[in-house]
Image: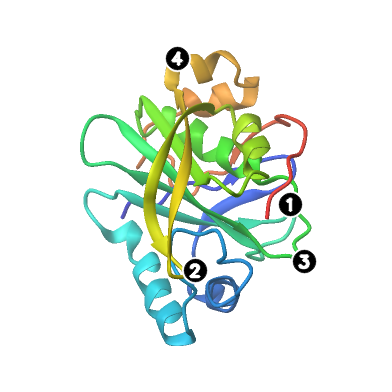
């Protein structure tokens, strides 16, 4: 199995999805507003259940390229959102994906911290060199989240995906391992230099406070 360790931050923590997370996962992916800016269309209940089953199988794939994790509040083991990392098949690149927080979540405003947790692990134990992310060009509130995560603007990809009957432009950002490491906190650097995946399974990894909270949706 290729399970990631728990990744703990100041305002939230990340862990692997569990079968008991179906209800919040289904709530997110069938929600009209929460799926508005995603790269996929809103699902019905059956589609969400099928997608959840595929996500649960991720740790059992070899090599593992998709990592969809549950976002939980500090001191609570309750899923209130998702954060993902998609490792590309060439080079040492990956894309941050699937940042969604439930509207009543106590961690709203701290979505950038979920990204930083995964970036520290990606640049460290996963050995990645470049991590990028994007948002719909009309979803301008996400710009602050990208900056707070340590990502830098790169380009606009024209009509990258088609949802809700329309093609959408995507604004992209990226970070490189050496540059990102220079602005990482001491605790994030500890993750960067932690043991490779496999030897850390089940070991919580703590991350210190990062940057001021950004607004997410």
Q: From this view, report whether residue 91 is shown above or below residue 72.
A: above
Task: Give the residue drawn at x 54%, y 76%.
Answer: 20
Task: Give the residue drawn at x 23%, y 30%.
Answer: 91
Q: Earlier in the sequence, mark 4 or mark 1?
A: 1
Q: Earlier in the sequence, mark 2 or mark 1?
A: 2
Report if the CB atoms under discs 4 and 2 are less than 8 Å apart.
no
State how far apart marks 3 and 4 are (Cα). 36 Å
State how far apart marks 3 and 1 are (Cα). 15 Å
Task: Give the residue drawn at x 66%, y 66%.
Answer: 78
Q: How many marks?
A: 4
Q: Which residue, given by chain and number where applicable, does mark 4 sit on?
A: 178
| Of 47 and 162, the residue lying toward us | 162
Q: Tell me: 211 left or right of 1.
A: right
Q: Which residue, given by chain and number where applicable, does mark 1 sit on?
A: 74
Task: Give the residue drawn at x 58%, y 79%.
Answer: 23
Q: Is residue 121 visible?
A: yes
Q: Quadrant of the N terminus?
A: bottom left
Label 4 element class: helix
State how far apart marks 3 and 2 are (Cα). 21 Å
Q: From this view, report whether residue 121 is shown above or below residue 170.
A: above
Q: Earlier in the sequence, mark 3 or mark 1?
A: 1
Q: Which residue, given by chain and number where applicable, does mark 2 sit on?
A: 18
Q: Residue 54 has which mark?
A: none
Q: Earlier in the sequence, mark 3 or mark 2?
A: 2
Front position among marks 3 and 1: 3
Front position among marks 4 and 1: 4
Q: Quadrant of residue 150?
A: top right
Q: Which residue, given by chain and number where applicable, does mark 3 sit on?
A: 104
Label 1 element class: loop
Front position among marks 3 and 2: 3
Q: Tell me: 75 left or right of 131.
A: right
């Amino acid at each position: 199995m290729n399970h990631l360790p728990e990744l703990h931050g100041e305002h939230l923590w990340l862990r692997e999805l569990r079968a008991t997370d179906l209800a919040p996962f289904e709530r997110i992916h069938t929600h009209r507003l929460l799926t508005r800016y995603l790269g996929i269309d809103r699902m019905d209940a059956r589609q969400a259940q099928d997608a959840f089953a595929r996500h649960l199988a991720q740790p059992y794939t070899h090599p593992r390229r998709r990592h969809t994790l549950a976002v939980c509040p500090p001191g609570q083991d309750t899923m209130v959102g998702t954060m993902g990392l998609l490792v590309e098949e060439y080079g040492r690149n990956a894309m941050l994906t699937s940042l969604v927080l439930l509207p009543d979540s106590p961690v709203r405003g701290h979505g950038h911290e979920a990204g930083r947790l995964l970036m520290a692990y990606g640049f460290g134990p996963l050995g990645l060199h470049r991590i990028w992310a994007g948002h719909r060009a009309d979803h301008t509130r996400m710009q602050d989240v990208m900056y707070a995560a340590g990502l830098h603007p790169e380009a606009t990809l024209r009509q990258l995906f088609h949802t809700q009957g329309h093609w959408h432009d995507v604004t992209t950002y990226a970070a490189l391992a050496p540059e990102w490491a220079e602005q990482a906190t001491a605790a994030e650097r500890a993750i960067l230099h932690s043991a490779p995946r496999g030897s850390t399974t089940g070991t919580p990894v703590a991350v210190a406070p990062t940057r001021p909270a950004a607004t997410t949706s």
